[in-house]
């Protein structure tokens, strides 16, 4: 459980390669210390995010494995010792916002028994990312030709360069296509509806639907309206370049959605102004095999069935950064948080008499499940008042 059953999407960036020097071009020319290998690597799965430990220069670092990022990400002034600047890279985050940032050399590091040399990544300022990890490994690890089987129950990732190693593994298989060097998959959120979603383990939520997809479904299938719970205005998703714009949000209660023939039933979700996404929550429900040579993913459900009942709670409040301060980006009318007094645009000043100076302070606050917390907020009209709300 996250505070307020809230999912803050901290989406990493999709690094696109550019054409003009001194731009750094996307490549997978980093080198690996072994060939014809199979390695079983311990992983950590926490808050629907996937982490692995690497070592470099006698130190150990925690890396987030983010399939929504085309290459690695390091943080300026952070704990991970990135090296020289390689040039600039045009980067697009999952909200569709584009900016030009620096690309940097990563130090040689060891992942399991494999030593990785010449790896590179984008350099970000860590404004809105809690310090749960040191840097990011992107989908270029798989675009290099490495296949993987990720099993969060056993806490392992089997990594190999052997072409046919997972051929005997059965499950629900879907193809992906690379768009800006990251995988996009097709799913069906309603009969006859096909959505294409970024497969993004850097995003937590199992499935969020882009507003553009929703518009298409409503135009083509009038009965899709049966899947809409409510509408509101606000913003909930935070990308590498900040929060999405303020716009209409649609609360969906899907009978289910199908991914590769496997059904996720009774699912609450919301729309986003960015891309539709399949996120890291998928790894709660089964193992996943990534085969980059065939451009397929194979899902092996833990329940040995053709469907799972998700039956999750709807997100009814979200916090986003505004000038690096936490504000209410969205609150669903009728929710306990709305009844307790939260309104869109409220800025969090204190929690339980502790000053909250930055959005990162808010993300790292030690909320206690079942306890009521006292929030001091400044409303958009400038008034300051207290709100008591339970996690």
Image: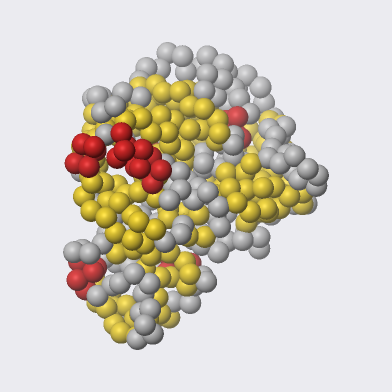
Residue 341 pos. (x, y %): 24, 75
Compared across the picture, whether 321 is left or right of 303 comes to: right
Frontmost residue, 47 versus 265: 265
Query: Which residue is depicted at the point 36% across and 30% down?
Result: 194
Residue 213 pos. (x, y %): 38, 40
Residue 245 pos. (x, y %): 46, 59
Q: For the view shown, which residue lies furthest in the right direction?
A: 21
Which quadrant of the figure contains the C terminus? Answer: bottom left
Q: Quadrant of residue 31 in the image?
A: top right
Frontmost residue, 312 versus 160: 312
Query: Which residue is depicted at the point 35% across and 79% down?
Result: 379
Asked if residue 210 is positioned above or below residue 383 in the image, the reply reads above
Q: Is residue 169 visible?
A: yes
Frontmost residue, 271 versus 304: 271
Asked if residue 362 is positioned above or below residue 58 in the image, the reply reads below
Q: Quadrant of residue 292 in the image?
A: top right
Residue 295 pos. (x, y %): 52, 23
Query: Which residue is depicted at the point 68% across and 32% down?
Result: 28
Q: Is residue 359 visible?
A: no
Compared across the picture, whether 56 is left or right of 95 comes to: right
Query: Which residue is depicted at the point 66% across and 22% down?
Result: 35
Which quadrant of the figure contains the N terminus? Answer: bottom left
């Amino acid at each position: 459980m996250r505070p307020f059953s809230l999912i803050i999407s901290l989406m990493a960036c999709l690094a696109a390669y550019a054409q003009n020097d001194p731009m750094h071009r996307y490549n997978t020319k980093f080198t690996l210390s072994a060939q014809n290998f199979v390695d079983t690597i311990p992983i950590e799965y926490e808050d629907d995010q996937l982490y692995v430990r690497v070592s470099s220069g006698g130190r150990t670092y925690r890396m987030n494995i983010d399939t929504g990022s085309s290459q690695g990400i390091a943080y300026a002034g952070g704990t991970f010792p990135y090296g020289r600047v390689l040039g600039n890279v045009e980067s697009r985050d999952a909200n569709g916002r584009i900016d030009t940032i620096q690309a940097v050399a990563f130090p040689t590091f060891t992942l399991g028994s494999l030593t990785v040399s010449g790896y590179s990544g984008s350099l970000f300022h860590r404004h809105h990312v809690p310090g749960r990890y040191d840097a990011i490994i992107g989908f270029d690890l798989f675009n290099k030709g490495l296949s993987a089987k990720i099993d969060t129950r056993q806490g392992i990732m089997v990594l190999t360069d052997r072409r046919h190693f997972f051929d005997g593994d059965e499950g629900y298989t879907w193809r992906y296509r690379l768009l800006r060097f990251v995988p996009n998959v097709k799913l069906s959120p309603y009969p006859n509806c096909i959505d294409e979603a970024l497969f993004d383990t850097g995003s937590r939520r199992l499935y969020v639907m882009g507003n553009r997809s929703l518009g298409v479904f409503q135009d083509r299938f009038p009965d899709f309206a049966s899947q809409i719970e409510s509408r509101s205005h606000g913003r909930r998703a935070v990308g590498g370049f900040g929060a999405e714009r303020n716009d209409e949000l649609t609360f969906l209660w899907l009978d289910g959605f199908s991914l590769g023939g496997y059904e996720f039933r009774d699912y609450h979700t919301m729309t986003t102004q960015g891309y539709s996404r399949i996120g890291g929550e998928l790894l709660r429900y089964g193992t996943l095999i990534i085969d980059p040579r065939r451009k397929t993913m194979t899902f092996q459900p833990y329940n040995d069935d053709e469907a799972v009942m998700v039956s999750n709670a709807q997100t009814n409040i979200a916090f986003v950064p505004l000038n690096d301060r936490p504000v209410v980006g969205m609150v669903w009318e009728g929710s306990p948080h709305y009844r307790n007094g939260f309104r869109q645009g409220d800025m969090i000043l204190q929690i339980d008499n502790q000053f909250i100076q930055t959005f990162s302070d808010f993300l790292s606050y030690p909320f206690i499940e079942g306890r009521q917390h006292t929030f001091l907020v400044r409303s958009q009209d400038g008034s300051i008042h207290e709100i008591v709300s339970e996690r």
